[in-house]
Image: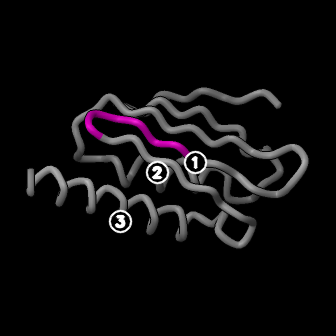
Amino acid sequence: MLTRQHLFADVTFDNAIPDYYPHRQAVETVIVEALRGFAGPWRARVVCSTLDAWWVLTIRGPGFDWATMLWPNDQTPETISKRLKEALRLAELERAAS
């Protein structure tokens, strides 16, 4: 499956979410919004299984390297936003403690 690459300010997004998925654009938006205010550059990537229904989301940026597996019930903008914001919050706490 081909991915589309988009550039949003300091975020490069490789998105393999199928075009028919109704929240494709909203997923991109919540990821870009979660990264807003953090110095970049950032790279976000969604890889979708061709055999099963899972996705893998990876986010890489300065001092941040994170991945999560998303099963179909997790593939919502709300769940993705919540997971990413929590990971960013924990990374900030770790940086502040070191």
Q: Estimate the x, y position of residue 49 in percent, counting from the top left.
A: 80, 46
Mark 3 surroundings: few (<14), some (14-19) or many (≥20) residues within 10 A = few
Q: Earlier in the sequence, mark 3 or mark 2?
A: 2
The magenta stretch spans residue 62 = yes
Residue identifier under label 2: 31
Q: Residue at 36% of width from left, 59% of height from top?
A: 87
Mark 1 surroundings: few (<14), some (14-19) or many (≥20) residues within 10 A = some
Q: Assess whether mark 2 and mark 3 are in contact (beta carbons under 8 angstroms).
A: no
Q: Nearer the viewer, mark 3 or mark 2?
A: 3
User: Which amino acid type corresponds to the residue marked 2 in the rendered image?
Assistant: Ile
Q: Where is 7 relative to 78, above or below?
A: above
Q: Assess whether mark 1 and mark 2 are in contact (beta carbons under 8 angstroms).
A: yes
Residue identifier under label 1: 57
SS for dot 3 = helix
With 80 as the anchor, is 25 left or right in this view? Answer: right
User: Which amino acid type corresponds to the residue marked 3 in the rendered image?
Assistant: Glu
SS for dot 1 = strand
The range drawn in magenta is 57-63
Task: Please identify the dominant SS of the magenta region.
Answer: strand
What is the spatial separation of the Cα atoms under label 2 and label 1, in whole angstroms? 10 Å
Residue identifier under label 3: 86
With 8 as the anchor, is 25 left or right in this view? Answer: right
Q: Estimate the x, y position of residue 50 in percent, counting from the top left.
A: 87, 43
With 15 as the anchor, is 33 left or right in this view? Answer: left
